[in-house]
Structures are given as C-alpha cells and as structure tokens.
Image (spheres, rainbow, N blue to C red):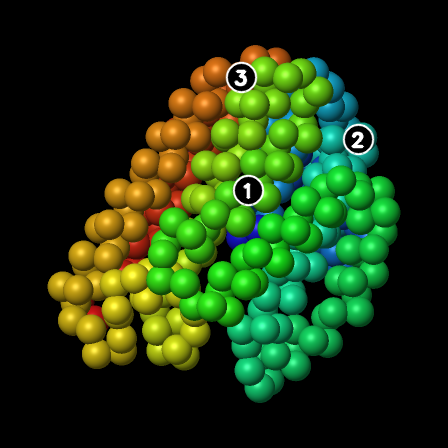
C-alpha cells in the first residue's frame, strides 16, 4: 500500500495524535518482531489505519507502554504492545508489499528493476511467513493481484476497471476485521472505497512519470495524455480525478458511519473525513501549473 490514508494533524487533538502515533510505532515494532529489522522500512499510514479500524470494530483494546524508538534508540516513545491486531496488520502488509514488489519489477527497467529484484529474497521470506499465518488473506490478495496484473498488461484504458482488483482486495481484507455479519458487509463496502481511493491516488501521483516513461497509467490512456499534452488538458484530467476521488471518500465516510466503532472513533473519522481529502489535495498541489 502507498501511504495515502493518513490523518490530518491540524484537526487532531494532541491526545488523539499521540494515540495514533502509538499504533504507528506499535505496528513498526510488530513488523520488526515478525519479519526482522529491515521490514520496518515498509511501515505505512495505510496499514496503521487498518489497525485502528480493526481495534475499532473488533472490541480488542490495545495496551500502551513506554519504550524507545526502534529506528532512533535515543528517542522515547509510547507505543501499542504486540497483540493479534498488530500481528494481522503486519502480516497483511507483508503480503501486499510482496505483490507490490513484483509489480514494480514488472514495470521498471534497468537499474531500478535490478534494485527491486535484489530485495525480492528478503521480501519473499516475509511473505512466506505471513501467508502461512494468514492463508485466507494471502489467497484473496493473490487472486486479485493476478487480475490487476492482467489488466495492466492489457493496458486497459478504463479507470474504473483498472482500480477494481485493488478495491476488491481491500474489501476482502476489511471484511476479515469482524465476525459479525452486518458489520462485515459494511466493512466490505468501506474497504472497497478505500482500495479504489488508494489505487487512483497512486495512479494520479505517478501520472507525469508514467507519461514520460510510457508506462501504464489508466488516466494517461483514458484521456490520451502524452508528453506534449497542454497544461489545460492536464488540468482537465486533474479536475476529473479530484472529483472521482472525492466521491470515493464520501462513499467511504457513509459506510463508516454505519459501523459500531468502540475505539479510536475520533481518529478514524479524522482520517476518513479530512486526511484522505488532504492527500488528494497534496498530490494535486504540485500539478496545477501548466506543463
């Protein structure tokens, strides 16, 4: 995953931000315990939110303790102690990151491809451990990532079709966060909207690089963008992308409001109502001037 589902710090109370950081640091620690120190560099906001959502709907209460930062031992932190929620989050992250690496190896050429290839043995080892602990999650992700690869190989120009596998992956992952039937259905819808949002944010973020490298990008293909496209043509695509992403955020928020959340509710609301929108605006802030 890519780090687009994150909080909007200016609108968080200090205690809420400290709790969010506690989950973030706890997930970092869990990644290290599960897969070794190098795994901590894969820590992301997206999986931190997955853990927060998991706590919120499962009724599991995290325990906080003081310690030192794994990446900076001189820094004191308060983090969530290892528990099943963090373990699930770390395992799911390891599985997703493995498929992201395979995708990068497919897309890149030359030195960049060799760099990703060099990481494969380490990432594959973490993947095998995670998949053994979470076979249902691993099978789900494998199925949809195969579909994602096929769509990209076929260079589909449909933006909706391109993001569908990632949306389905997140729908399935979020469904696993609860055992209650109605709650599962709502989580599935929320996950679908989040997955769509993540894929399209990534495509929008990489748009100019993909155009220059002639790589796959559904926005570039759908709207026939080239290195010679005008600033106005680009602005039109940016506007359409913003509208579509805002719609996904609104649908995610509607689903979230139907959930019975017992922990971290203000933090989750901040991420869904403010943080995701800020991510879109941040991506587009550097793309608004004519090219």
Image spot of residue 38 (x, y percent): 76, 60
In front of the other: label 2 or label 3? 3
Q: Residue at position x 79%, y 31% from top?
A: 84
Name the residue that disc number 3 marks: 259
- Tell me the quarter of the picture where residue 211 sits: bottom left
Please give left or right for residue 254 compared with residue 173 in the image: left
Of the image marks 1 and 3, the number of the one nearer the N terminus: 1
Other-residue count near label 1 (Cα within 10 Å), few / some / many at <14 / 14–19 / ≥20: many
Mark 2 falls on what kind of element? helix
Image spot of residue 174 (x, y percent): 61, 32
Q: CA distance from mark 1 to mark 2?
A: 24 Å
Q: Residue at position x 61%, y 79% from top?
A: 113
Quarter of the image that includes the C terminus? bottom left
Name the residue that disc number 1 marks: 168
Residue 141 drawn above or below residue 184: below
Pick the front one: 51 or 212: 212
- Tell me the quarter of the picture where residue 237 sits: bottom left
Residue 30 drawn above or below residue 204: above
Name the residue that disc number 2 marks: 84
The total of numbered circles placed on residues is 3
Q: In the orientation shown, which residue stands out farthest toward the bottom?
A: 110
In front of the other: label 1 or label 2? 1
In front of the other: label 1 or label 3? 1
Mark 1 falls on what kind of element? helix
């Amino acid at each position: 995953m890519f780090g687009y589902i994150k909080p909007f710090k200016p609108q968080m109370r200090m205690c809420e931000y400290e709790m969010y950081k506690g989950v973030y640091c706890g997930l970092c620690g869990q990644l290290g315990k599960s897969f070794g120190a190098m795994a901590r560099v894969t820590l992301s906001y997206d999986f931190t939110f997955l853990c927060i959502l998991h706590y919120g709907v499962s009724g599991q209460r995290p325990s906080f303790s003081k310690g030192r930062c794994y990446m900076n031992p001189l820094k004191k932190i308060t983090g969530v102690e290892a528990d099943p929620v963090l373990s699930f989050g770390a395992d799911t992250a390891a599985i997703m990151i493995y498929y992201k690496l395979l995708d990068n190896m497919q897309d890149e050429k030359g030195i960049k491809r060799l760099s990703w290839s060099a990481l494969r043995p380490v990432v594959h080892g973490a993947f095998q451990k995670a998949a053994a602990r979470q076979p249902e999650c691993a099978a789900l992700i494998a199925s949809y990532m195969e579909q994602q690869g096929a769509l990209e190989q076929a260079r589909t120009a449909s933006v909706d079709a391109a993001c569908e596998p990632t949306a389905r992956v997140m729908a399935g992952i979020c469904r696993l966060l609860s055992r209650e039937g109605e709650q599962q259905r709502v989580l599935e819808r929320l996950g679908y909207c989040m997955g769509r949002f993540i894929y399209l944010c990534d495509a929008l973020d990489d748009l100019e690089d993909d155009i220059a490298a002639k790589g796959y990008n559904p926005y570039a293909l759908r709207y026939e963008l080239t290195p010679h496209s005008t600033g106005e043509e680009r602005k039109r695509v940016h506007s359409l992308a913003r509208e579509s992403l805002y719609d996904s955020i609104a649908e995610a928020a509607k689903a979230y409001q139907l959930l019975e959340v017992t922990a971290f509710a203000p933090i989750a609301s901040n991420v869904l109502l403010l943080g995701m929108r800020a991510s879109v605006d941040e991506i587009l802030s550097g793309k608004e001037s004519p090219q």
